[in-house]
Image (tube, helix red, strand yellow):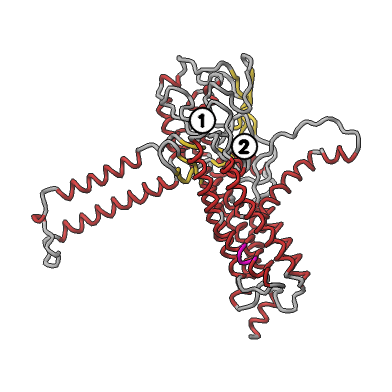
Amino acid sequence: MSDANSILRWFHLGAEEDSSNIFYGCLTTILASTYLALHLNIPPPYPAVRSSRTFLQRWYRSRMLWELRRQLSWILALVIAPELLVSFAFGDWRAARLGLSILHEKGRGNVRDWTMAHAHFANMGGLVFSVQHRGSEVPDAAPFKSSGGIVVLQEITDAVNLSTVKQLQNYLGAMGSKIAKWIKRVLTRYASWPWSFGLSRSSRAPHQEEIELDNLAARDASVRNSPPERTGINTGQVDVRSSGPAAGSRHSPDSASPVGATEALPEARIQLHLNVVQVVAAQVLGVLGEVPQIDMDGIEARSKVNPLIKAIAAVRLLWVFATVIIQGSINSSLTQIELSTFTYVLCALVSYVLYWSKPQGVEEPDKHIVAISDGVRPVTDQDIKYIQAFGGSPFLLRNFVPPFGMDNLQRHPTECIPTDISLTSFAFFGPSGHKVFFGDSDVAGVLVGMIFGGLYCLGWNHSFPSLWEVWLWRASAIVITGSLIPFSLANAACTIAFSDLTDRSKPLKTHNIHVLVLYFLLALYVFCRFFMLFEMFRTLFI
C-alpha cells in the first residue's frame, strides 16, 4: 500500500490533492488538448469592413480578433462534442490518402515528390490557382474529348465514389479467393491420402473445382469493377459518360448557377481552390498543367506548429493519460472531471496520430497563376461543374442545417475549403435511386461518440450530491453513447422517405417532420453534454 501511495504522490494524485488543483489542472488540460489537436483549414480572406468610428469597434473588427473568434468558436464546438475532432481527423486522413494515390496514378509532373503532407496542404486549401474563365461549354476541339480524357475522368470518379465498405468487400473477396485457391492446392495435393475423407480426383466431375474457383474469381472481379450507384442524396457524383455534365444531380446545371459563380466576361480571371483530386481532374480536363512544385520547407515555414512542438504536446497528453490509468489500476477513486478529462485526452491523442502529417496554423495559401499554352486552355463553366463533383460537402451543414444534404450540393471550386469538409464516403444507404451519403467522417464520429459515452458510463456508481443527479448522469451517459446512431438513421430514413415528396421545380424545402426529428435528437444530445460539463465541475467542490 505504501508503494501505491508513493506512486500517487509522485503523480500528484494523492488524497491530499486539493480540489482547486484538480479543477485548474483538468480545465487547462481539456482546453489545451482541444486547441493543440485542432488543425483548422486555411481561413477565408479577411472580410473588408468599413472604417469604424470608435476604438472598440476597430478593435473588435481587427484581423487578430476575427481569427481569435474563429478559433474559439471551433474550440467551443469541440468541447461540447469532442468526437468531432476525431471525425474530422479521420476524414482528412482518408481524403489525403485517396487523393495522393490518385495523384500518383493519374497526375502529371513531379507527382512522386508529393507526400501526405503535400496532400493535406492541398486539401486544406493550400493551393489557389488563378485561371482564365471563358465560355460555358468545353470546345469540341479540346484534347480532353479526343484523347480519352472522358475515360480517365470516369476512372477518377469511380475511385472517389468507391466507398470504404466496397473496399472492405473487395479486400475480403480477394482474401477469400486466395484462401480458396490455397485450399484447392491442398486438396489436390493430398486427395489420394487415406485420411482424405473420400475426397479424390475421381470423386468430382473433371475440372469442376477449377470452374467453381474461376467463377468465384470472376464474381470478385465484377464486384471490384462495378461502379457505385450514382443517384441519390448528397453523393455529389457526376457521370461523365452521361449527356450532361451533372446528370443525377437534384439541381439542373442549366437551371441555376452554382454557388459563387458569376457571369464572367471574356478573358476574366477567377480563383479556384482545388484539393488533390480536383487538381488531377483539372489536369485531365486540360485547364491545368503540371502539379506545382511545393517544397516541404515552404510548408513547414507556413505552419505555426513544427513536429517538435507536436511531440512535446503529445508527451504532455500521454502523461495525463498515464496518470489516469495508474490511478484507476490501483483502485483510487476518479472524480467526474478527471474521467471527463481522460476522454478529451484520448480524443486528442487519436487526432494527433491522424493529423501528424497535416500542417497546422497555416493562414495563407500558395497562389499560382495559370498561363494559357498549347496544353492548357481557359476554364469553362462546364469544366467548373466537372471539378465541383470532387469538391466534397461540409459535415456540419450536411448533418445539422436544413436541407441536411438533400440538395446534393458540393463545394464550389471558387469557395474556400472549410475545415469540416467530407471528401470520402463510407457507404451509400437506401434503395436504388435514393442513395444516402454516409461519409468516413460520419462513421468515425458515431463510433468515437459511442466510445466517449461508454467511458462516461464508468462513473455509473460515482457519488453525487442528490439522487436525481445520479439518475440524470446515468441517463446522459446512455444518451451520449447511443444517440448518434438514431440520429444518423433518422436522417437517412427521412431523406429517403421525403425525397419523393419534394417538388424539384421549386426551391428545395425540408419536410417539417425531418427537421423536428433531427433537432429533437440534437437538442437531447446537447442537453446531456452540457449537464455533464456542469456536473463534473459541481461535484468536485461539493
Identify whether 195 is placed above or below 247: below
Classify residue 196 by image quadrant.
bottom left
Rendered view: 217 above or below 468: above
Label 2: how many residues lie within 10 Å, few (<14), some (14-19) or many (20+)?
Answer: many
Q: Residue at x 56, y 16 (%)?
A: 135
Amino acid residing under circle 2: Ile
- Residue identifier under label 1: 250
**Residue drawn at x 37%, y 48% as measured from the top left:** 169
Front residue (pair 106, 394): 394
Q: Is residue 475 magenta?
A: yes
Graded by Cα atoms within 10 Å as few (under 14), some (14 to 19) or many (20 or more), the crowding at tag 1 reads: some
Residues rendered magenta in the picture: 472-476
Q: Amino acid at mark 1?
A: Arg
> Where on the picture, by quarter, is residue 61?
top right
Q: Quadrant of the N terminus?
A: bottom right
**Closer to the camera, 151 or 223?**
223
Which residue ends up furthest to the bottom in the rendered image?
1
Residue 199: in sight, yes or no? yes
| Left or right of 479 on screen, residue 284 | left
Q: Which mark is residue 417?
A: 2
Query: SS of the residue at dot 2?
Result: loop
Q: Main secondary structure of the magenta part?
A: helix
The image shows a total of numbered marks equal to 2
How far across and how far down the image is residue 277, in percent?
Answer: 51, 35
Name the residue at 53% across, 34% down: 408
Q: Is residue 161 left or right of residue 306?
A: left
